[in-house]
Amino acid sequence: MTTYAVTDPQKYFFLHGGGELKSMEELFMELQTMDPAVYAHHVNDERHDFATWVRDVMGDRSLARRMEMSRDRDEMLKLLFINLFR
């Protein structure tokens, strides 16, 4: 399993409406139950906050590019699962 985590609070991902993510594992877990409105706030036609965080903070450009090509939460879960648990 690949571990991606940050310890600097300035690099945490802050979810719309509250909550913070410190690792891609937490992103994976949160996406499973995330309210659709929160997801739509972060992933829409104008932006893809999760892909940006994965690229800029976690440093995984390849995964971020694949994430950017999808707006679908189930597809995002599959991409993260493959990346985290391969």
Image (spheres, helix red, strand yellow):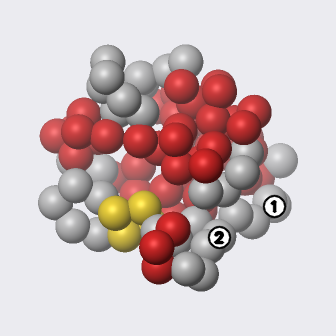
> Callout 2, which amino acid?
Ala
Whether residue 48 is visible to the viewer of this picture, yes or no, is yes
Q: Where is residue 6 in the image (x, y as percent from the top left)?
A: 61, 73
Q: State the image quarter where residue 45 is shown.
A: top left
Packing grade of label 1 (10 A; few <14, some 14-19, many >=20) is few
Q: Position of residue 42 (x, y in %)?
A: 31, 40
Q: Do the residues labelled 1 and 2 touch (CB within 8 Å)?
A: no
Residue 1 image label: 1
- Observer-nearest residue: 8 or 79? 8
Q: Position of residue 60 (x, y in %)?
A: 73, 45
Drawn side of residue 61 relative to residue 15, left or right = right
Drawn side of residue 73 relative to residue 16, left or right = right
Drawn side of residue 83 relative to residue 77, left or right = right
- Residue drawn at (22%, 46%) of the image: 38
The total of numbered circles placed on residues is 2
- Residue drawn at (51%, 68%) of the image: 11
Drawn side of residue 11 relative to residue 6, left or right = left
Report which residue position mark 2 lands on: 5
Query: Is 70 drawn above or below residue 47 in the view shown?
Result: above
Secondary element at image label 2: loop
